[in-house]
Amino acid sequence: MKKRYFPKIRNDECKGCERCVIACPKGVLALGKALNVMGLPHVFVADEAACTGCSLCFYTCPEPGAISIIEEKEED
Amino acid sequence: MKTFRIIKDRPAGFFAEFEKRPAPLRHNMHYCPGCGHGVLHKIVAEALTDFDIKDRTTFISPVGCAVFGYYYMDCFGISTPHGRAPAVATGLSRAHRDSVVISYQGDGDLAAIGFNEFIHTVNRGENLCYIFVNNAIYGMTGGQMAPTTLVGQKTSTTPHGRCASEDGIPFRVAEIVASQPNPVYVERVALSTPKEIMKARAAIRKAIKNTMERKGLSFVEVLSPCPVGLKKDAAGISKFIDEEMTKIFPLGKLKDVAAERVPVEHPVPVYDREKVRAALFPQENGAEETESSGKKLREDVYNESEIFEKERRIKVAGAGGQGVLSLAYIIAHMARLRNFNVTYLPTYGPEMRGGTADCSVVASRREIASPIVDSNANMLIVLNQPSLDKYLPQLKPTGVIVYDSSSVTLPEIGENQVAYGVPAAQLAVGLGSTRYGNSLILGALAKMMEELFLTPKDTKDFSDVVEAALRECFADKPKIIAPNLEAFRLGKENAFRAETIKTPK
Ligand SMILES: Cc1ncc(C[n+]2csc(CCOP(=O)(O)OP(=O)(O)O)c2C)c(N)n1
Ligand code: SF4
Ligand code: SF4
Ligand code: SF4
């Protein structure tokens, strides 16, 4: 059984503060150039494969639902 | 086959949608990008569901950026006036024994405007969870200096940097709280690096747990980023917290005695309407209501004498400690017992004893416009010479004086003024205690009223009402009722209409 993790960003809830970008030990997240409904830049998942599911980005993010962490299980 | 599981998501301790928010954006909070309030709210919201306490938690957030906390937390929410959260939190926590009350306050709120109230709440050790958001600034109002602002830190009110000699030094609240005996748990944490954030989470969860277990007051000071107020980006503000703030506000646990503490208990408040009524008005519930209990209003008695038709303004004055106020109080009760409207307004000198004391009593069948008697008094009751000298000018030209002739020498009085004296202090000593002086004066008052104003029917009633008022006022000291009634009788017997030197018109 293989497990992997990845973050999911709700673009319209992210305020682009970059706290998660700094917090992520694996460099998974990066700030993009596109603007969301609030007119703010938001982060995107730049290196999904590197994510370990540590959830540090989730706890450092000030927005309630901007980041979720997903676990993917593959049964063989 | 692939399966997916969400391991971290928007905590269910938040409302699913922020319907109270006015903006069209109902999923975001109103905070600036990167604000520590959001990080903290998330930790609290997560605990609300993890500990299953949504239905018994109240999140109190007073004025400051977090004033709209109740938009977000799916529990009870109150935003209080600036600095006033401790009082509201105390009331709630005491009134609802099993409630979990979280007082969430900023540094301007808690450490400046609300510190007085806060520190006494700490001293009482109320069962509360305190989250103190130290962001070193007033965020909401645009970045003014807070008590926690660092020396040298530029704010809109310290444009050249906080100056220690002019503006004081950063105020260490956690240390002050920890120095007090009652709080059970005090820790300082920071919302800078993920490692510190996870420690902050653990501390807040512990504080909430303590509150759930009624351990007393738990206090978590949180060094929190206000990137906008401090004009820094996310990296800059984290660095500021880790490298500057923690030098002055060291992180760590300052106190933890929760394990040794037994749950806090307070008397259980009674809300049942009927029980409250019964406690306040025992006579309504069949408790014996007799004339001798002094409680009964004699609605059947109507005082017919002409004197009662107009508003009567009485000044009672003497030295502090002479019983001036209790004498006035008895007179006010006499009026109340006969269904007059009555006001009682004591004035105290700053001295407990030796100074002067005076009291205004106004009785009327109509509404009373002012309870102050400082001119046109109908009656002056004086227990010492300085009071008579001081208040005589306030007596109406047709007013009456009742005085203690053992210490007061009557000066010249107006042509149409009358004075009745009784050697009250002297006779009281004979009765065994100076405290009977008041009843002796009431005797002189009764004699004066009878001779000058009362119809025969009211004459009898006047003595009755003196007795009823004495019984009421001394209800908790039944032993002294009989000697006071005796003093009243003696006062009436010994009272005299003074020969006076009249000032010609
Ligand atoms: C009685 C009263 N005085 C002053 C204010 C103005 N005022 C609003 S917020 C604030 C400062 C709040 O600072 P803090 O408690 O540190 O919270 P923050 O905004 O930094 O989160 C002040 C002084 C007010 N609203 N009410
Ligand atoms: S879960 Fe951990 S590794 Fe994954 S993006 Fe978030 S911080 Fe980075
Ligand atoms: S911490 Fe949250 S709000 Fe800030 S950039 Fe990351 S996802 Fe966006
Ligand atoms: S001013 Fe500061 S404390 Fe207030 S919302 Fe903005 S970042 Fe947060």
Image: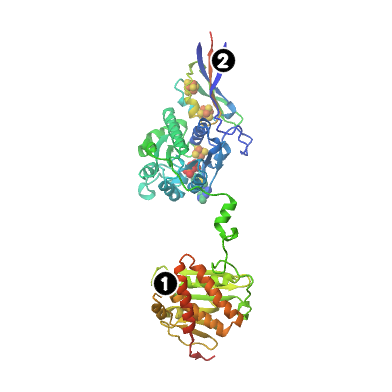
Where in the figure is residue B282, as x and y percent of width and height? 56, 59
| Residue B324 in view, yes or no | yes
Residue at left offset 49%, top offset 18%: A51
Mark 2: give few (<14), some (14-19) or many (20+) Cα within 10 Å: few
Picture layout, residue B4 above or below residue B501: above
Which chain letter matches label 1? B
Residue at left offset 45%, top offset 86%: B411
Query: Tag on residue B407?
Result: none
Element on which disc 2 rests? strand
Within the image, what quadrant is residue B26 found in? Answer: top right
Which chain letter matches label 2? B
Where in the figure is residue B416, as x and y percent of width and height? 55, 87
Picture layout, residue B425 above or below residue B83: below
Residue pointed to by mark 2: B3
Query: Tag on residue B320?
Result: 1
Closer to us: B163 or A53: A53
Q: Is mark 2 within 8 Å of ligand 2?
A: no
Mark 1: give few (<14), some (14-19) or many (20+) Cα within 10 Å: some
Q: Residue furthest top?
A: A76
Element on which disc 1 rests? loop
Closer to us: B390 or B165: B390
Where in the figure is residue B328, as x and y percent of width and height? 50, 72
Within the image, what quadrant is residue B468 found in? Answer: bottom right
How many numbered marks have been drawn onto this rendered protein structure? 2
Where in the figure is residue B239, as x and y percent of width and height? 41, 32
